[in-house]
Image (spheres, rainbow, N blue to C red):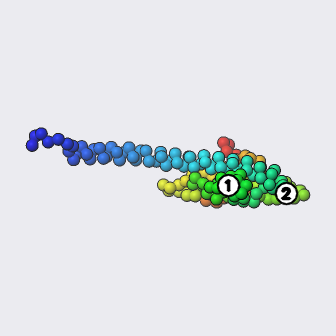
Amino acid sequence: MKNQKGFSLIELLIVVVIIGIIAAIAIPNLLAARRSANEGSAVSSLRTIHGAQMTYASTYGNGSYAAAISTLGGSINLVDSVLASGTKSGYNFVGGATAASTTVPAVFFASANPTTTSGVTQTGSRRFGVATDGVLKADSTAASLGTAYDQTTVAAASPMGN
């Protein structure tokens, strides 16, 4: 019996504990990387929406912007079908527009809000918005994460990076 080969129970338990420690360190970093990637995708999507709105106003809208993001998809294909559906990479996208009048020009806004705002499955920790001027705005107030920016809130928010 002295020539038995293999691992003892203690050695196997030590390996399992080491794997558990490595997993406990790695998983939060992976979740943070996913949130960061979702936020980057949301910012990029808002830039796409801004460009699509400018194109829409000059070619299809006769100076007015599309009232909904879904209008930018479909047959005119200014945004991809996933973004036009309103949900992409863990963010919900909403938008609106106000037509021009004799005293004010046409304006639009779009916002991106995380679909899940807390817990392990949190898809983002900031909401984003863009308006006609093209300046991206961000807000990390926990109470506002689930609500969409509207035209007034986007205009009043601080630009990203400030």
Closer to us: 74 or 32: 74
Residue found at the far front of this picture: 75
Is residue 79 toward the left or the right of residue 29 in the image?
A: right
Q: Secondary structure at mark 1?
A: strand
Say few, some or many: other residues with alpha carbon within 10 Å of mark 2 (under 14 / 14 to 19 / 20 or more).
Answer: few
List x then y, in percent, for residue 16: 30, 47
Q: Amino acid at mark 2?
A: Ala
| Quadrant of the rendered image containing residue 64 | bottom right
From the viewer's side, name the closer residue of 5 and 29.
5
* Kind of residue at disc 1: Ser
Q: Quadrant of the N terminus?
A: top left
Residue 48 visible in this rendered orientation of the protein: yes
Image height of 26 relative to 64, above or below: above
Q: Residue at x 85, y 57 (%)?
A: 100
Where does the image place residue 96, in percent across and percent down from the top left? 74, 59
Q: Is residue 69 visible?
A: no
Q: Extreme right residue here? A: 102
Left or right: residue 135 versus residue 121 is right
Label 2: which secondary element: loop
Check disc 1 and report the residue beneath it.
Answer: 111
Which quadrant does the C terminus fall into?
A: top right
Local packing at callout 1 (Cα closer than 10 Å; few below 14, some 14-19, many 20+) is: many
CA separation in Å, label 1 and label 2: 21 Å
Question: Residue at left 52%, top 45%?
Answer: 33
Q: Residue at x 26, y 47 (%)?
A: 13
Task: From the top left corner, tell me how far across and down residue 12 is, in percent.
Answer: 25, 45
Q: Which residue is mark 2?
A: 100
